[in-house]
Image (tube, rainbow, N blue to C red):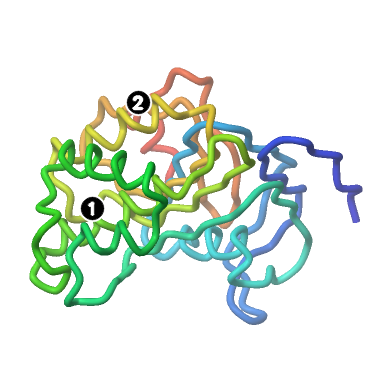
Amino acid sequence: MPAMPTITTASVWMPKGLCIGYQKTRIAETSEEMTLGSGTHYLLARNGRGKTTLLKTLSGLLKPVSGTYQTKGHCQFVGDDLSFDRELSATLIFRAFLSPKKRDEAVVLAEELELDVRKPFGQLSFGNRKKVGLVVSELTLDPGKAEILFYDEPFTGLDTPARLAILARWRRTENEAIRIVSCHPDFDAMEMPKALLIADEKIFVAGDGTQTWADLKNLLT
């Protein structure tokens, strides 16, 4: 078994041969050793190729079929079905999960996302429910600590302005956390300087740091 490196800042380390799947069913494995550092890493694959499985494995929710990995930092998995009490408004949800200082920041981000913070969660559309989860997960980050966020399809249900607002926040705070984000990009010009792909049952890093979705999509099989 490869020796685990000594890591002092937020990082995700995967050796060659880490195999992911459910129970003993193999889905994919790493084709190379890789260490992911701060910033946004887009996880790309066709449906059913293991994106959610990889995120759940790295966040500790699933055991790997074989092999090992190491995460250095506080891990938070944000699924596409994140839910809150249906009777609570976003304002009350922020109050329950966030410190007073963070609540003010949450309201600002909610305004950027055009989220009605007064409406009960159960009356929000699917996209607006996603916004509540995004705001809470983003504002629970502590810039002074090692933080790792695993986002499973966070853009589903979001309109273009909301998606762009989230991307802008990620650029502003890229040094504060590692974000591994599974998604299905819908425009070729979307910039993906850091990308992790699953194709042909292999998990690997792709690109040269300047690529867009147009440069990467043909690698998916």
Label 2 crowding class (10 Å Cα cut-off): few <14, some 14-19, many 20+? some
Choose top left, top right, bottom left or bottom right for residue 34: top right
Residue type beneath disc 1: Lys
In this picture, residue 14 sits left or right of residue 172: right
Vertically, is 20 above or below 149? below
Q: Is residue 30 left or right of residue 159?
A: right
Q: Report whether 115 appears left or right of 48.
A: left
The disc labelled 2 sits on which kind of residue?
Glu
Q: Position of residue 218 (x, y in %)?
A: 38, 37
Q: Which residue is situated farthest in the bottom direction here? A: 23
Structural crowding at the residue carrying mark 1, measured as other residues with C-alpha within 10 Å and reported as few (<14), some (14–19) or many (≥20) = many
Residue at horizontal 60 percent and vertical 51 percent from the top: 202
**Which residue sits at x=61%, y=72%?**
62
**What is the quadrant of the N terminus in the image?**
bottom right
Q: Which quadrant of the structure image shows residue 47?
A: bottom left
Q: Nearer the viewer, residue 119 or 49?
A: 119
Where residue 41 appears, as percent x and y from the top left, is 49, 38
In the rendering, which numbered label is found on residue 72?
Answer: none
Task: Give the residue number, with chain letter if any, for mark 2.
Answer: 191
Above-or-below relation of 199 to 23? above
Q: Secondary structure at mark 2?
A: loop
Label 2, label 1: how many angstroms apart (C-alpha)?
22 Å
Question: Tag 1 or tag 2, which sits nearer the N-term?
Answer: 1
**Dot label at residue 131:** 1
At which x and y percent is residue 184? 30, 48
Q: Residue furthest front?
A: 100
Comparing labels 2 and 1, the label whose residue is closer to the camera: 1
Which quarter of the picture shows residue 13?
top right
Q: Residue at x 50, y 20 (%)?
A: 209
Q: Position of residue 165 (x, y in %)?
A: 23, 33
